[in-house]
Image: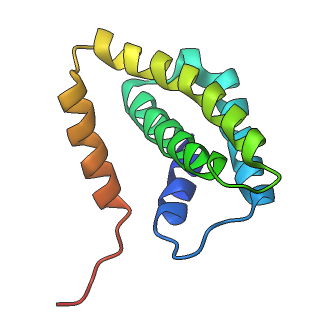
Amino acid sequence: MQALYEQIQVYLNMDEEISFKEFSSYYKQVLDQLGEQSESLDEEMVWKSLFIVENVMSNAEGRSRGKGPEAKKYAKMAQRLELWAKNLASRLGEAGYSEEDISERFNEMLEEGTPATKA
């Protein structure tokens, strides 16, 4: 999951949109990793997995509103990821984190991937 986390940080800082093919490939990698590792994820990886899932889900939802031929595929991706998001968020909730904690941590994670700017 660490490699997927690093890749989402790259995607989030790109100026251009990735192709459907690349998006779909990344999405499938995320699902495969979650399917294989979800039960064995430590707390840090649950955070990173939720961050990945939420960002891919949000992006898929945005793309599903388009008129292109892949709009329905994006909508299905978003639906499937919503289940994972609920599962991972529930695990963090059971560990004692609130929605506010999750939001705050996500902001920190977004900052991690932001390239440094020169003053």
Q: Which residue is drawn at 32% across and 50% down?
A: 109
Residue furthest bottom in the image: 119
Q: Quadrant of residue 42?
A: top left
Q: Which residue is drawn at 77% across and 57% down?
A: 68
Along the line of sight, the residue nearer the viewer: 85 or 77: 77
Asked which colour scheme the image uses, the reply is rainbow
Residue 5: give x, y in percent of width and height.
51, 48
Q: Which residue is drawn at 65% across and 46% down?
A: 64
Residue furthest top in the image: 94
Q: In which quarter of the image is residue 82?
A: top right
70 w.r.t. 30: above or below: below
Q: How many labels does the image show?
A: 0
On screen, residue 22 versus residue 96, left or right, reads: right
Residue 50: give x, y in percent of width and height.
45, 33
On screen, residue 51 versus residue 118, left or right, reads: right
Residue 1: give x, y in percent of width and height.
57, 40
Residue 94: give x, y in percent of width and height.
31, 9
Along the line of sight, the residue nearer the viewer: 57 or 65: 65
Q: In which quarter of the image is the C terminus?
A: bottom left
Along the line of sight, the residue nearer the viewer: 41 or 29: 29
On screen, residue 74 versus residue 15, left or right, reads: right
Q: Residue at x 70, y 54 (%)?
A: 23
46 w.r.t. 3: above or below: above
